[in-house]
Image: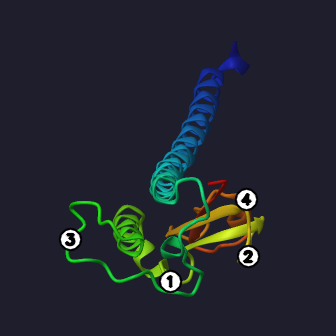
Amino acid sequence: MKYALGFSLIEVLVAVVLTCIGLLGMVALQGRALQYIQDSAQRNTAATLANDLVEMIRLRSGGQAVPAGYLKTAGASFPSTPSSCANTPSAADQQLACWALRASALLPGARELLVDEFHICRSAGENRCAAAGELLEIQLAWKVRPGECLDARAADSAEPICRYRLRTRI
């Protein structure tokens, strides 16, 4: 009994240390889960925007080639926004301008990325815009804090830009 004094105190300290380690792990897990949730919400918004544009183009093209008013290369500006986007404009370039206005409002930091990171083009394959491609490629982008983009390409770098790319047949 003489050597057992203080043994309960050591057990309690070990239990407290293990509990603290477990709680710290849960806090880290919670932070990472919030990152995934935020990335998922932004990707869902980008997917919705891209699908909206595809449906506008399909409606306008009637299953034929993509009308030129909907195409935009990286580095080119979007058409100027009409006076009102409340009702869907009839001209392709005005529809594209209203879509870009919505995209810049819904995706964080997209307003600064509209010219360089957004593109809508005919595509002959992955990341290859071509004049006579059989696919339509739409790329959207938004800003995040460095290291928070969870897509494979940006995961290697500390680049604060996430991209969503959709390729489809019209």
Mark drawn on residue 84 = 3
SS under mark 1 = loop
* Residue 118 drawn at (x, y percent): 54, 74
Dot 4 amino acid type: Ala
Mark drawn on residue 24 = none
* Measured Cα–Cα span from mark 1 to mark 3: 21 Å
Is 66 situated above or below 32? below
Tag 2 near tag 1, CB within 8 Å: no
Dot 2 amino acid type: Ala
Instruction: Report which residue position mark 2 lands on.
Output: 130
Q: Quadrant of the N terminus?
A: top right
* Residue 162 drawn at (x, y percent): 58, 65
Among the two numbered marks 1 and 3 on one chain, the one whose residue lies closer to the N terminus:
3
Instruction: Report which residue position mark 1 lands on.
Output: 115
Residue placed most toward the observer, 153 or 71: 71
Q: Quadrant of the C terminus?
A: bottom right
* Measured Cα–Cα span from mark 2 to mark 3: 32 Å
* Measured Cα–Cα span from mark 2 to mark 1: 19 Å
Is 7 situated above or below 97? above
Q: Residues within 10 Å of mark 4 (few under 14, many from 20)?
A: few
